[in-house]
Amino acid sequence: MKSTPLSLIAGTVALAAVTGFAALTAPGDADEPEARAAARLPVERTSLLCPVPSMSDLAETTYTSFTPAGKSGGEAGAAELEPAEALPADEDAPADEDASDEDGASDEEKEKEKDADKETAADGEPVISLKDTGKPSTADTDKSDAPALIGTATGKLAPGWAAQQTTTAAAGGARGLLGVSCSAPDTDFWFPGASTAPARQDYIHLTNPDDTAAVADIELYGADGPLKSDVAEGITVPARSSVPMLLSTLTGEAAENVTLHVTTRSGRVGADVSVAEDEVGSDWLAASGDPAQTLVLPGIPADATSVRLVAFAPGEDDADVKVQLLGKNATFAPAGNDTLHIKSQMTASVDLKDVTRGEPGSLRLSPADGSGTPIVAALRVVRGKGAEQEVAFIPATAPVGDRASVADNRAKGSVLSLTAPGGTAKVKVTASAGSEGGEPTVKTYTVKGGTTLEVTPEVPSGLKGNYALTVETESGGPVHAARTLTLTEGGIDMFTVQTLPDDGGTVEVPQARQDLSVLDD
């Protein structure tokens, strides 16, 4: 009987490690319902990874780091993004206790030398240190060999920490505005919308934040099923490093529309796909949300000239889904494309052309036959025509939930898309103080159920530098959000779209009561 309270204590300590708080108590009597209630508490540690920004000599990258004010996880804290670097091979090997120390250096001296080596390796590379909540910090680089970044936020800077990587490549094969929200490490990622076609150069970037190597597997699925590959399994990602791989080198089969599945056998990684498409532009393809029966893809620009939907059913059953556009005033089915059949393990795609027809919109995919087969999906969106085309991607995303932020916004060019797929909802949008000055502004919007509301955010008063946008659901049904950033270079309106899923700034922690007298000697 003694094992029960000991197990409870172990579980409570584990929760404390994650959240920074847990009550050392066990379930109380039936007349104490508050003892069994769960509380939502701020997280006290958050990790983010930013991929290698670009391999172009003509690219300029801005990093922006931000934590919204409120919901503090503690008084003190730090949030830093530092260059990823592989540990020397001998540091991964077990220490040999019998080996002699030839140079006679003490352990303390060796640690100092190791730290000095790391500082030298990072010298001149972008590193962002966030000092406080409610105001973003930025860093810039124009280096073609700029590294991936690995970061951790603690204390009051952890809840809702967000980082954005925005790269402008004004010319060359990778021309475009490439934006990506730095993401948390995980073990499972889906990327519908990738490609191994000759006109595309898609790289999967795997970044390992930990001090031991991770091992990843990659699966590729085309329109007819899995693509053969002899080199996509057992990929080692060294400790604290990033590995980019060209998808077309992983298989001998060229496919225009591919679903990419990344899993890890050991460890965890961050994963993003960089896309460069001949004569169309470049951007990042972020991972789709987890497979689900109903998906929302928010923020299709009003002036989109081409929209392609790519979807995949990862289970054993086919999926039949309704395709609906949540427009400015109502929900309707695209003409001739009101349903889509997705065969199991086969990538399906449909060209929706200029589906928004001059009005902003979002796409909702839902079961058409009641089967409710989980799917993943993404949109390839093109604006402009001819030599002035530019491409971006919109993955299916989770709702804003309590709160979500996007870190990098400019005085001009930011547009926020808010979609309520169910009931009417009210949201609060906060434009933070600028990175170099200015006061935050707050505005509340009502989003009618079944529609998409596109707004140009009110910029902070006296804005200097970049600012962040935070969206909070105040009432009503779920809201999905996306931010489009547009920058004009060489007469081309280059753009990128980032979705805003819930920031996970709080975690549910069970409250319990424990009578420590049950612990016998």
Image (spheres, rainbow, N blue to C red):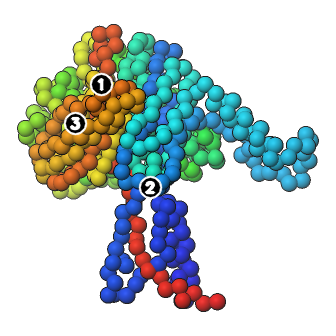
In the rendered image, the quadrant that contains the C terminus is bottom right
Is residue 41 visible in the rendered image? The answer is yes
Is residue 393 visible in the rendered image? The answer is no
Are there few (<14), some (14-19), or many (20+) residues within 10 Å of tag 1? some
Identify which residue is drawn at 54% across, 69% down.
13
Identify which residue is drawn at 91% across, 43% down.
104
Q: Amino acid at mark 3?
A: Ser
Front position among marks 1 and 3 = 1
Q: Would you identify the image quadrant in which residue 512 lies?
A: bottom left
Looking at the picture, tell me which residue is in the foreground, 393 or 442: 442
Q: Position of residue 239 (x, y in %)?
A: 63, 42
Disc 1/disc 3 C-alpha distance (Å): 17 Å
Looking at the picture, tell me which residue is in the foreground, 315 or 113: 113
Q: Of marks 2 and 1, which one's residue comes earlier in the chain?
A: 2
Q: Would you identify the image quadrant in which residue 458 lies?
A: top left
Against 400, residue 113 (above or below) is above
Identify which residue is drawn at 19% across, 37% down.
362
**SS of the residue under disc 1:** loop
Identify which residue is drawn at 52% across, 37% down.
129
Q: Amino acid at mark 2?
A: Gly
Q: Which mark is residue 73?
A: 2
Total tally of numbered discs in the picture: 3
Q: Position of residue 317 (x, y in %)?
A: 30, 53
Q: Position of residue 410 (x, y in %)?
A: 32, 26
Disc 2/disc 1 C-alpha distance (Å): 30 Å
Are there few (<14), some (14-19), or many (20+) residues within 10 Å of tag 3? many
Which residue bears the numbered disc 3? 417
